[in-house]
Amino acid sequence: MLRDLLIDSELFNELREKALDREEGENSLEEVELLEKTVFQRLKKKRSVKKYKKLGVNKRDLKEIIELADILGLDAIGGPSNYELAKEHQEWCNICGRCCRESESIFIHRDEVNILLNFNPGLEKEIIRNKLYPEHYELKDIQPCKFIDPETNRCSMYNSRPQVCRSYPLVLVESNGKAKNIINLRHLCNYSVHLVLEKSIILFDEAIRKLKENR
Ligand code: SF4
Ligand code: SF4
């Protein structure tokens, strides 16, 4: 019920299906559901259903709001974009190092190769053609990436690391001819969980505002 105040249900289903299709392999449905469960446990502490019971709000509403937060950039409703939220809250990354140990590919755009090599001359031996997009490059021998310090989880070329590493857990994708930052939905990535949680809180509050307005 709450989510319908923010988006048409048919449009939501279409967007969700597209998002999950696109993320197939990366954000498997199982992984997305695990993230949603984790966010739900936290959201119900921030926005108690009891408090809004008289308005007809229930747990299902919280779950539906989270599903929307997974796929909708808040800039669509006049709020901050995924990029703006992530940039404001770098403390959400707890430096667990999972992204540096588990990423299947560390993509390097052909336009950033020269800059990367200027700062890290030894990197030449560590870069190979990208398997999916041969006009671009990627780091070789990852999982784990050899630039992560096993003790501290810090990157040894942090100040000049590839763009994908700077953006994580956001991933740049093409959507309707436009570049868009989507969240890599990983339940064990604290940054990703917090991003979805924060968006869910904003969406929940906006839906409640509309609900009260319509009464
Ligand atoms: S971005 Fe996520 S997975 Fe990577 S170090 Fe930070 S919290 Fe861990
Ligand atoms: S280059 Fe640095 S930030 Fe990127 S995956 Fe490797 S250790 Fe992590």
Image: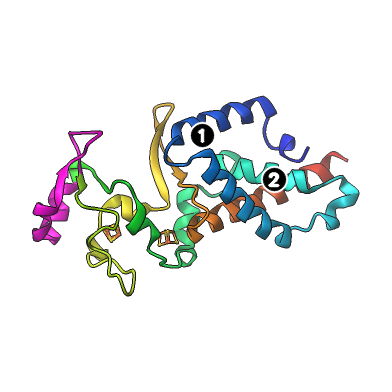
Compared to residue 70, the image places residue 18 above or below, namely above
Q: Residue 36: in sight, yes or no? A: yes
Q: Nearer the viewer, residue 11 or 184?
A: 184
Q: What residue span does the magenta drawing correspond to?
A: 112-137
Report helix, strand or loop for mark 2.
helix
Classify the position of the C terminus by image quarter: top right
Image point (48%, 57%), residue name = 189
Residue 125 part of the magenta-drawn span: yes
Apparent side of residue 127 relative to residue 42 in the rendered image (left or right)? left
Q: Amino acid at mark 2?
A: Lys
Query: Measured from the top left, where is residue 8 in percent x and y?
Result: 68, 29
Q: Earlier in the sequence, mark 1 or mark 2?
A: 1
Apparent side of residue 106 relative to residue 111 in the rendered image (left or right)? right
Which mark, by number, is residue 102? none
Quarter for ligand 2?
A: bottom left
Apparent side of residue 151 relative to residue 1 in the rendered image (left or right)? left
Classify the position of the N terminus by image quarter: top right
Residue 143, by quadrant, is: bottom left
Residue at numbered disc 2: 63
Report helix, strand or loop for mark 1.
helix
Q: Nearer the viewer, residue 141 or 54?
A: 141
Q: Residue 73: in sight, yes or no? A: no
Query: Measured from the top left, where is residue 209 in percent x and y?
Result: 77, 47
Cα–Cα span, label 1 and label 2: 17 Å
Residue 44, by quadrant, is: bottom right
Classify 10 Å Cα crowding around label 2: few (below 14), some (14-19), many (20 and above). Answer: some
Image point (80%, 54%), residue name = 49
Residue 162 part of the magenta-drawn span: no
Residue at numbered disc 1: 20
